[in-house]
Image (cartoon, helix red, strand yellow):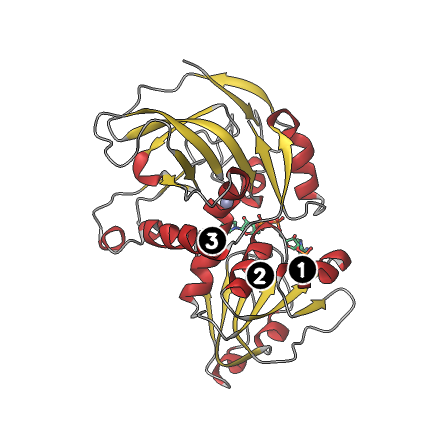
Amino acid sequence: MACNVMSAQTRGATLTPWTYQPGPLGADDVRVKVVTCGICHSDIHMIDNDWHISTYPLVPGHEVVGLVEEIGASVRHLLVGDRVGIGWQRGACLQCPDCLRGDENLCPENRATIVGAHGGFADYLDVDSRFAFKLPDGVSSVSGGPLLCGGVTVYSALRHAGMTSGQNVGVIGVGGLGHMAVLFAAKLGNRVTVFTTSDDKAEFAARLGAHEAVNTRTGEIACSRPLDVLINTVAAPLDWEAYIKTLGSDGTLTFVGIPDEPASIPLIWLMARRRRVTASPIGGRAIMEEMLRTADNFGVEPIVEVFPMARANDAIQKVRDNTIRYRAVLEA
Ligand code: NAP
Ligand code: ZN
């Protein structure tokens, strides 16, 4: 059997069709026939080797929804025909204190779907079944992919920063991750303020459930109510001092988008109101299940633009140009 994929043969390259032979299916693995795959900005960071961990040929794709076609000898929790999702993580030791707590994303041996392995811009993908999540019936195949990386990343970051309900929550950047942060925070009963550089997104924010939108290209970084939780989804240096000042006492700024240069945050503005700054990577298996349940129960449906797999390059260009509204999804 061969996997037919779209791959970058060199750093920054346009994707081209390519084929590879997967190894034998491991005892804990499943073979998944890909149905859809979202495009996360991390795929583009990997194509461009922004993090100096890429190897080529690189097959992007870590927001995968597919149907289980074959199961390894030890797999008990999935059946052939099950609809599953696969996100950024494809493995962990499953024995360290972090893994035992359900924080597999913090495991020192965590392995990523598209680092040292080929991803989901493909017709088939073999993965460790412990990192393939059965999707609730209420989560559609085009919604499922974006939730598996972008969704769990913002949900976990917001929860670990203390988000419950009835709070004031801010979201910086309304891209793939940012719009899902607005959806989760608003559907769970919070008052949401978005900070965006896009005129149309400022106008559309209310339709996502936001109560207030600040266009930071034309307006001041400020907010009508002190924020309890503020999440940054932008990978560019911003005026962090101004953002810290939007937090109320004991408020938390959590980073999921990481600027490519060190952030300068004056500690005096943290001390003055006992504010916190933190950062959060994806989410472990326990919060992944919780996020999927929450998305199902509260109708959190990412807004997507669907492209056939053969048009992956057009979709990637739209993400680069920030003209996607709000997540690009490829159909295999
Ligand atoms: P995306 O869809 O491209 O969205 C990024 C948004 O950032 C844009 O839509 C835009 O929002 C804003 N933006 C972009 N350039 C900007 C600039 N120069 N100044 C101000 N705002 C800018 O990307 P994504 O898929 O949501 O991913 C966002 C970041 O999170 C990426 O760096 C990705 O690698 C990272 N990520 C982290 C994790 C994690 O585990 N922590 C997981 C997944 C992704 P507006 O148009 O609203 O301004
Ligand atoms: Zn991602």
Is the residue marked 3 within 8 Å of ligand 2, measured from its CB? Answer: no
Q: Could you say which disc has been placed on residue 223 in the image?
A: none
Q: Is residue 31 above or below residue 95?
A: above
- Nearer the observer, 285 or 294: 294
Mark 2 vs 1, N-terminal side: 2
* Residue sitting at x 31%, y 35%: 129
How far apart are the alpha carbons under marks 2 and 1? 10 Å
Q: Position of residue 86 (x, y in %)?
A: 42, 38
Q: Position of residue 115 (x, y in %)?
A: 43, 36
Q: Could you say which disc has been placed on residue 207 in the image?
A: 1
Q: Are marks 2 and 3 in contact (CB under 8 Å)?
A: no
Q: Is residue 262 above or below residue 99?
A: below
Lateral position of residue 329 relative to residue 138, left or right: right
Q: Secondary structure at mark 2?
A: helix
Q: Secondary structure at mark 3?
A: helix
How far apart are the alpha carbons under marks 1 and 3? 17 Å
Lateral position of residue 129 relative to residue 125, left or right: left
Lateral position of residue 306 relative to residue 3, left or right: right
Camera sees residue 60 = no
Q: Residue beneath label 3, please?
A: 295
Q: Residue beneath label 2, please?
A: 182
